[in-house]
Image: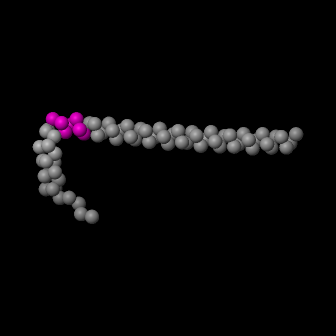
Amino acid sequence: MMMPSVQQLLIVLLIIVVLFGAKKIPDLAKGLGSGIKNFKKAVKEDEEESTAQTKIEQDKKESVANSTSETTKV
């Protein structure tokens, strides 16, 4: 895979500036940045929720196992 040259990147940047205007580019970058930040936050929250759910399920299994072993002891 070939990397784009500096000249190609400058041409693309120039086209973007012409299409959107110099004042809109910071707003677009800010919006993109906040979108990425929100996405990462949602992924992190989902992972934490999944981990918590797994812990709850493990605790339930241990509780059932403990109550079963106590019942057989009596």
Render colour scheme:
one colour
Where, by quadrant of the figure, is residue 25 drawn?
top left
Residue at the (22%, 35%) spot, across then down: 27
Is 51 placed left or right of 63 in the picture? left
Residue 21's spot in the image, x, y percent?
A: 13, 39
- Residue at the front extreme? 19
Residue 38 in which image quadrant: top left
Dominant secondary structure of the residues highlighted in magenta in the image = helix
Q: Is 33 inside the magenta-drawn segment?
A: no
Q: Measuring from the top left, give residue 53's x and y in whole percent.
A: 58, 40
Residue furthest right in the image: 74
Q: Nearer the viewer, residue 21 or 40?
A: 21
Q: From which residue to which does the magenta span run? A: 23-29
Residue in view at x 11 percent, y 43 percent: 18
Q: Does residue 28 belong to the magenta stretch?
A: yes
**Residue 43 drawn at (x, y percent):** 44, 42
Count of marks overlaid on the render: 0
Residue 43 is left or right of residue 56, and the answer is left
Depicted 4 relative to depicted 36: above or below: below
Quarter of the figure with the C terminus: top right
* Residue 6 found in image quarter: bottom left
Residue drawn at (14%, 38%), measured in percent from left and top? 22
Q: Position of residue 73 (x, y in %)?
A: 86, 42
Quarter of the picture containing the N terminus is bottom left
The furthest residue to the bottom? 1
